[in-house]
Image: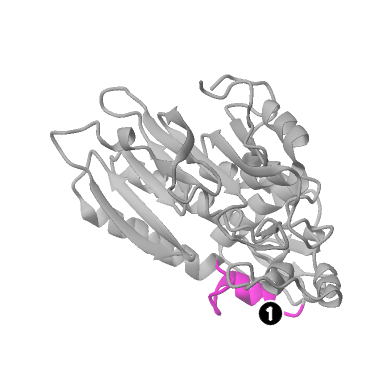
Amino acid sequence: MKKKTCPKSITENSKRLSCKRKRILPALVLLLLGISMASSGCAWRKEAAPITRSGFYFDTVIQITLYDSRQESLIDDCFAMAKEYEQLLSRTVPDSDISRINRSGGAPVTVSDDTIKVIEAGLAYCELSKGAFDITLGAVIDLWDVKNNPGVLPDRKELARALDTVGYEAVSIEGNEVTLTTPGAQIDLGAISKGWIADRMKEYLNSQGVTEGILNLGGNVLVLGPKSDGSAYTVGIQKPFAEDGSLLLSVDISDGTVVTSGIYQRYFELDGTIYHHIFDPDTGYPYQNGLLSVTILCPDSVDGDGLSTTCFALGLTEGLALIESLPDTEAVFITTDYEIVKSSGFPA
């Protein structure tokens, strides 16, 4: 990926952004992504088969593959991390930090350092997108319930009431205390948390001497590499709505992340219109902007998470312009006509 000139990464600046003022604050945008590991990416080592295990956290499958270690206990440790973070960050866990914030009725809630960091990362993307990405869409997400929706649009009055609770400016952070200043506001970190957790897992594995592996958190693919022979991993990007899981294209990556936000994993169709899980905070309806998916390539998975949703929300023109302004970051946009639009430095 080519180098670009711009300020430091968004997540590096999130703490600075959150301290500019008291926080007066996807979107549960569940990033169930169209990414699969192409077969060539897993067949490079014949003398020692990798160890692979799967678990279920954050309502998604997590798969961890290690190539240069036979210690399954390391995978156990990563799963323990996933469980711990789920207990902090999932709003469907009754006693999580996020659930306690959401039901606090506007009272300050003391939460963990990690919870603060993830909220700040989410808020950084809220600000970067000027609100097109918003972590306080919980009430809207609940009303639509896309995963279980049989094909019914929400009542407009109920949707208007839910929209009244949306606005990241309602999130106020003071030290380790989080306050929601808008009655009924609901934080949802689904658009940022899996990427943040993947980065923590990678840090842990690196600290234990693991330098070759693949972390796949519900489609957030993070690779540890390059491989021992110096070659890259091949990650396939699924063709949207392809029932056979066929790939639209693939990309070689040595050490970094591939993250996609798309409309084709959680949706329902009504009268020829697809209603998906990426919501516009202004209307309360799913974005209808001519895009099927956005895939990000960058070093850190939390940025891949935040940018894939942000760029989808911004649309093709603004999203592409944002990517071109960021260092070590590339993207590919898939339009509703299946046109493939790549950023200037996207690998051939």
Q: Would residue 228 be found to the left or right of residue 199 on screen?
A: left
Q: Is residue 121 above or below residue 104?
A: above
Residue 234 locus on image (x, y percent): 39, 32
How packed is label 1: few (under 14 Cα within 10 Å), some, or many (20 or more)? Answer: some
Residue 170 locus on image (x, y percent): 80, 64
Q: Amino acid at mark 1?
A: Arg
Q: Residue furthest front?
A: 271
Residue 101 part of the magenta segment: yes
Q: Would residue 77 be found to the left or right of residue 17 on screen?
A: left
Please report the residue visible at 27 percent of the width from the left and 44 percent of the height from the top.
66
| Residue assigned mark 1 | 103
Front residue of 202/36: it is 36
Does residue 211 appear in the picture of this structure? no
Please report the residue visible at 69 percent of the width from the left and 41 percent of the height from the top.
311
* Count of marks placed on residues: 1
Residue 174 locus on image (x, y percent): 72, 62
Q: Residue furthest left?
A: 47
Q: Would residue 316 be found to the left or right of residue 44 on screen?
A: right
Q: Which residues are magenta?
A: 90-105
Q: Is residue 231 above or below residue 64?
A: above
Residue 145 locus on image (x, y percent): 64, 71
Front residue of 155/11: it is 155
For label 1, the SS is: loop
